[in-house]
Amino acid sequence: MAVVLAAVAFVGWRWWHNHPPYGPEALVIKSSLQFVSDEEAQAALGEKVYAPVSNGRDQLVLGRVSWQTPPKPLDGGHFAIFLIDKRTNLKPGRFSASSPLQEAVGFGSAGVENKIPERYPWLRGAGDVKEGNTWWTYGSRLAVSDGNASPLTFVALFPHVEGPLRTVVHVPTAPVAISDLLLALVHMGPDGQVYWAQRLQG
């Protein structure tokens, strides 16, 4: 009897532990994507953040994501914002971002985010890339550690690459169309729980 009660308690705890504190509808998320020039990118980011430097036929994509203050604080979790080229399932390698809480916004990747495409196959570009028997981490996502960091403005660089280098560059390259891009926000819990994923664009 004690074993049965322990098992029931564990199942109940696991459900509670993985249960989202709120859904994406509570945030009333708004977003946009557009191509911009160097000057427009810098103006959108403000004076304290430098936009990626484009060269020649590179492309800059300006993204804006805003949300209402969450019903509960993130408490060690984070929002992961992914911009993915659907043609290759790759993430950009260079970002700049500005927010009212600049210290709450980071770049890079996290191993726990490999769980995302397991639950949401349409977000398979969120995880690492498999080449043969090896997994590689390419590109970056934006991580927001404070729910009050809205609105978030970012600029991503899509470099123009020609010749043999094109086959060894593991980030999305120009030319790219807005329709090629997927923008998503994922709510991650403090222990790596994937609470939910919301498609914003694409």
Image (cartoon, grey):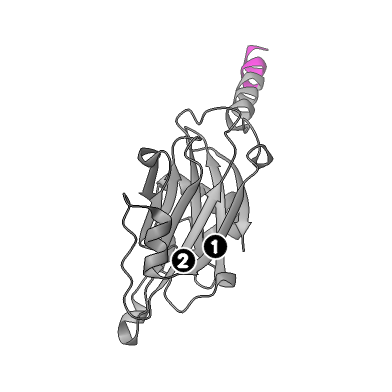
Q: Position of residue 94 (x, y in %)?
A: 35, 61
**Quarter holding residue 52:** bottom left
Q: Residue at x 52, y 54 (%)?
A: 64
Whether residue 200 is visible to the viewer of this picture, yes or no, is: yes
Q: Which residue is mark 1?
A: 33
Q: Secondary structure at mark 2?
A: strand
Crowd around label 1: few <14 · some 14–19 · many ≥20 (10 Å): many
Total residue callouts: 2
Residue at 62% x, 33% y: name it: 20
Most distant residue in the top direction: 2
Q: Position of residue 73 (x, y in %)?
A: 52, 28
Numbered mark located on residue 61 in the image: 2
Residue drawn at 31 percent across, 81 percent down = 165
Write the start and end of the magenta stretch as one range.
Answer: 1-7
Measured as percent of width and height from the top left, residue 170 is found at 37, 69
Q: Main secondary structure of the magenta part?
A: helix
Which x, y percent locates residue 82? 50, 55
Q: Is residue 139 visible?
A: no
Q: Which is more N-terminal, label 2 or label 1?
A: 1
Looking at the image, do the residues carrying marks 1 and 2 touch, with CB atoms under 8 Å apart?
A: yes
**In terms of secondary structure, where does tag 1 sit?**
strand
- Amino acid at the residue labelled 2: Val
* 161 sits left or right of 28 in the view: left
